[in-house]
Amino acid sequence: MRVAGVVPHRDRTANARNIGVLFGQRTQLWWDLPVRESLALLRDLYDVGEADYRQRLEQFDDVLGIGELLPLVARKLSLGQRMRADLAAALLHRPRVVYLDEPTIGLDIAVKDRVRAFLRGLCADGTTLMLTTHDLGDIEDVCQRIVIIDEGRIIFDGSIAHVKDSFARERRLHVDFTAPVAPERLAELLPGAEIEGGQQSFTIRFDRFTHTAAQVMSALLAAGEVADFRLDEPAIEDVIRRVYAGDLGLAGERP
Amino acid sequence: MRKYVTLAKMQARAVLAYRLNFVLSLFALMFQLFAMLAIWGVMLGSGRTLEGFDWPHMKAYLLVGFLCGALVSQAADWRMAGRIQDGMVAIDLTKPVDYQGARFAEVVGGAWTEIAMALVVCAGVIAFTGPVPGPGWSGGSLFVLSLLAVLPLRFLIVYLSALACFYTQNYLGVHWARLVIVSLFSGALVPLVFFPQWLQSTAAVLPFASMAATPSLVYIGQLRGTEALVMIATQFGWVVVLWLLARLIFRHAIKRVTIHGG
């Protein structure tokens, strides 16, 4: 196995220069020293030039707001602050491959969004990200390829879009009419869709490859006057829940 | 090289965070020293001499032993073992530095507090119990040379026992076993000449005497000239042997790492 052309167990230090690592559960900051000192140490460990280092800190300040954390002692940081500082520590030397173990664990929504936006930016810049997470929002927001492991076995390896196309085809449209509509009329207008409910409120379940949402809407408008509607998008979370529950067998596609 | 210097500087500052803990644990060492001084004070009282030791020389011997024993006795010891036990070693391994060299740099950086505190204690003992004989000029330079080998030697013994955590997953037992073996065979508490012959010959082939007995004996002038140089060369020989041995063990131990995620 090679990582960026290097065999990790044979050439640990060469590999170490190529990679950046973040463990959500552990910190690589020096517990008893200000964050600034830890970053300065990493600068020297990775031979980062002074000008490059300053530029990097400014970047981190823009996206992660690291500036206010620099003078603080690591053990006094909150979890969110610590994670931001740890992200900066993992990425200071511009690694080509970054491993992130639960990078958003325990973070509040605002910080989580910031971290995810930052990770998307990294991907766009050509950095390879490896993310392990239990937070499926991380995956949907950041990743292109997903590997699902269950009890040590790879049960799926493919693109996020593929997971959704294969296993999250069903969409649901909830609709309220201003006056009662006969369910038979809807079934007639929407062959192949399942119709639940009655009177004025219905839930239409349809395959997004046989009907588009627009087709469904125009059928509904033909049936009566629509007061309100809501569309449920398929979520990766549902798919994964069903995989682990054993409802879905993922054949898997190997890219 | 710069990375190791920075690591040493970082540790030199980090040890200050634990100064209270440090002073307290030094107290423990200090009481051990006071107990030994009291016992030897009685045995060598009113000008008696045993195996070539009179009271002032014995006092100097014990103080040098105490100084040697204070090195790498504090935070570094538990820190190295702790990082292996709780899996932080995984993070250390993602850094582009030699693992053993980095740990040594940290120990060198942290040593100044240990040296400073040991010197304060020695000064206190001398102030209360009277002066100790000095080593003289030629003895003094040999003593400094011999003392220089003690820091890497003590580091290596502590580092090797920390590596045991890869196998035992627990450090307390290893720590205590090491303390007992080192204090016995290093001659820091009782000079090795007082041992029965078989124990002396055992100590002679072990590295521990190099960690305290040699500098102590050089200081009080029982080892001098060529004899002293041979013993000092032995000290540095042990540094090389243990350094290589530690590398060998590390290479094997590292394959045993299993770190569980959250």
Image: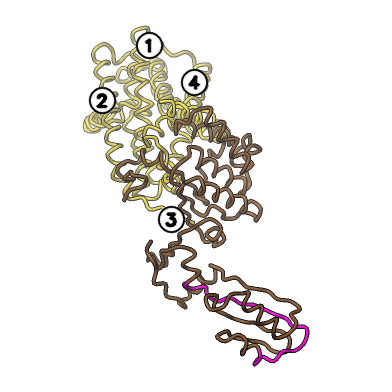
Chain colours: A brown, B yellow
Q: Which residues are magenta?
A: A166-185
Residue A161 position within the rendered picture, expressed as x and y whole percent measured from the top left? 49, 65
Q: Is residue A174 magenta?
A: yes
Residue at the location (50% across, 22% down)? B116
Image quadrant where residue A214 sits: bottom right
Determine whether the residue tagged by mark 1 lies in a helix, strand or loop: loop
Mark 2 to mark 3 CA distance (whole Å): 39 Å
Q: Which mark is residue B135?
A: 1
The residue beneath circle 4 is B119
The residue beneath circle 2 is B237
| Mark before the other along the chain sequence, 3 or 1 | 1
The residue beneath circle 3 is B260
Closest to the observer, B230 or B135: B230
Closest to the observer, A132 or B228: A132
Q: Nearer the viewer, mark 2 or mark 1?
A: 2
Check chain identity for marks 2 and 1: say if they share one. yes
Image side of residue A218 versus residue B213, left or right: right
Q: Amino acid at mark 2?
A: Gly
Closest to the observer, A250 or B27: A250
Q: In what quadrant of the picture does the C terminus of chain A appear? A: bottom left
Image side of residue B223 versus residue A190, left or right: left
Residue at the location (66% across, 53% down)? A110
Subunit under mark 1: B
Other-residue count near label 1 (Cα within 10 Å), few / some / many at <14 / 14–19 / ≥20: some
Q: Amino acid at mark 1?
A: Pro
Residue A113 position within the rendered picture, expressed as x and y whole percent measured from the top left? 62, 53
